[in-house]
Amino acid sequence: LAKTTQPISMDSYEGQEVNITCSHNNIATNDYITWYQQFPSQGPRFIIQGYKTKVTNEVASLFIPADRKSSTLSLPRVSLSDTAVYYCLIKGAGGYNKLIFGAGTRLAVHP
Amino acid sequence: NAGVMQNPRHLVRRRGQEARLRCSPMKGHSHVYWYRQLPEEGLKFMVYLQKENIIDESGMPKERFSAEFPKEGPSILRIQQVVRGDSAAYFCASSPEGAEETQYFGPGTRLLVL
């Protein structure tokens, strides 16, 4: 079962770049790495997904080294509205696509 | 293009009553997932359904909980004889055929058992 480890919390300031790293030592060959964002009292929102190397969209970048045992979510120039919990997920074992959520990383962006 | 819809958004029940939570997936999505989230914790997978089929219910408690996704209409998560420990946020997610690793979540139903 692919387990993820990420920092419990992080603090940043407006305008800074934030990098959240997730460890997933026993990721399977066919698994994708997915990041979700969750605001209080809302459902998680898909941010980005990747398999290897680098993926970039309008919200974030995802860096995945060759061994795929970790990944880093990069949020450029964060604002106060980026304060949320960020979850790193690996597709669950068993092939039935259940997402395994850890405790996530609570990012607090300060003015 | 409406997202995943859940209702009610808030539900209050007394111990022993039944709770029925509804989820309408995004248009064109045939896969539905239910998750439960306790305060200050991550989401916990409960069940994965396709139309008229339960694919994976490994996260469902053995008693009192059931789920369905009929051919017509929303998916229903049903909790019989609720207890205080059932108080949580219940989230539904959906995904399209062929892209099951990308799940889109609804706003959740917050169940409070008095």
Image (cartoon, helix red, strand yellow):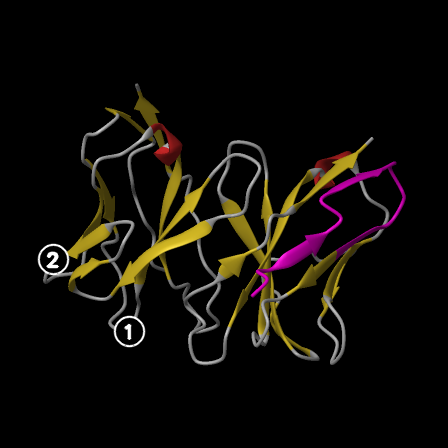
Residue tagged by mark 2?
Answer: A65
Q: Residue furthest left?
A: A66
- Position in image of residue B3 (x %, y %): 57, 60
Task: Indicate the quadrant containing the N terminus of chain A: top left, top right, bottom left or bottom right.
Answer: bottom left
Q: Quadrant of residue B74?
A: bottom right
Magenta-colored span: B1-21
Judged from the image, the secondary structure of the residue bearing numbered disc 1 is: loop
For the residue pair A28 and B96, the one nearer the viewer reads as B96
Say which label, 1 or 2, has the lower sequence index.
1
- Position in image of residue A27 (x %, y %): 27, 62
For the residue pair B74 and A99, the one nearer the viewer reads as B74
- Could you tell whether A40 is left or right of B85 in the image? left
Residue beneath the point at 23% across and 66% down: A51
Residue tagged by mark 1?
Answer: A30
Please tell me whether residue A55 belongs to the stretch shown in magenta.
no
Labels 1 and 2 in the same subunit: yes
Task: Indicate the quadrant containing the C terminus of chain A: top left, top right, bottom left or bottom right.
Answer: top left
Q: Is residue B7 above or below residue A28?
A: above
For the residue pair A71 and B85, the one nearer the viewer reads as A71
Res B60 visible = no
Res A91 visible = yes
Residue beneath the point at 86% across and 47% down: B81
Residue type at the position of mark 1: Asn
- Could you tell whether B28 is left or right of A37 in the image? right
- Could you tell whether A103 is left or right of B95 in the image? left
Query: Rounded to the nearest whole Å, what is the CA distance between mark 1 and mark 2?
Result: 15 Å
Judged from the image, the secondary structure of the residue bearing numbered disc 2 is: loop
For the residue pair A30 and B27, the one nearer the viewer reads as B27
